[in-house]
Amino acid sequence: MANASEAFLRLLEVLDRMEIPYLVGRSVASSVHGISRPTMDADVVADLLPELVDEFAWLLKPDFYADPITIREALARKRSFNLIHYASTFKIDIFPLRNDSYSRVSFARREFDQSSSFGPKPIECAVASAEDTILRKLEWYRAGGETSERQWNDLRGVVRVSGAKLDREYMRHWAEYLKVADLLDRLLAEQLA
């Protein structure tokens, strides 16, 4: 039986083959930089150009539900789309790279690391930096009404594991831009308590 690891590796193979820059974020990134936990899906930011959609979908088609019309419409609306791996039903959400200054800066800061979120064998992939993982998770936490204990625990884990290495000046600068400075202050104050 196929698993999440096979699904994720297949997507990485296609992204690499087509030379599409990407980064893995959210839960997978917070597991890399914090406390590892299994995930039911993966969130990937990809700089997928509209003219590459047909080839991208065609290469994924044998293994994934990947509809080029849906993908093209999502990109035109600057919205995410998902890929469903047939054999494992693992879902991968693909987010188009936004064109705002923070998104471009954070994308440029991605780094290759090992993720164990998909099974016992680590997979090397481009992940968001620890600082950008925190900032994006704070955005999601706010958008979700600031009620998700799972999101907040992921954030605590990243600060606990990566805390000494975090570029706090960078985070404070972009937290203001993203309108999550109050949440960042709260998160960092918990670490000191």
Image (spheres, helix red, strand yellow):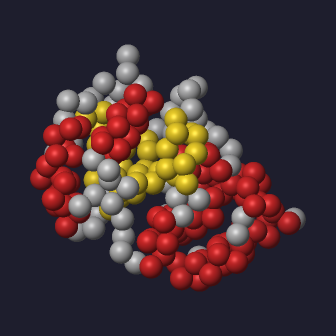
Q: Is residue 179 left or right of residue 33?
A: left
Q: Nearer the viewer, residue 31 or 123?
A: 123
Q: Is residue 184 left or right of residue 118?
A: right
The image position of residue 23, as x and y in percent, is: 45, 54
Residue under the point 72% across and 64% down: 166
Count of marks placed on residues: 0
Q: Is residue 41 above or below residue 85?
A: below
Residue under the point 60% across and 77% down: 175
The image position of residue 39, as x and y in percent, is: 51, 39
Q: Is residue 84 left or right of residue 12?
A: left
The image position of residue 15, as x and y in percent, is: 33, 46
Residue 121 visible at all: yes
The image position of residue 74, as x and y in percent, is: 22, 60
Q: Nearer the viewer, residue 171 or 79?
A: 171
Q: Nearer the viewer, residue 81 or 168?
A: 168
The residue lying furthest to the right in this view is: 193
Residue under the point 45% across and 71% down: 103
Q: Which quarter of the figure is the N terminus placed in?
A: top left
Q: Which quarter of the figure is the C terminus placed in?
A: bottom right
When asked about the image quadrant of residue 97, the answer is bottom left
Residue 134 visible at all: no
Residue under the point 20% across and 30% down: 62
The residue lying furthest to the top in this view is: 1
Q: Is residue 16 above or below residue 192?
A: above
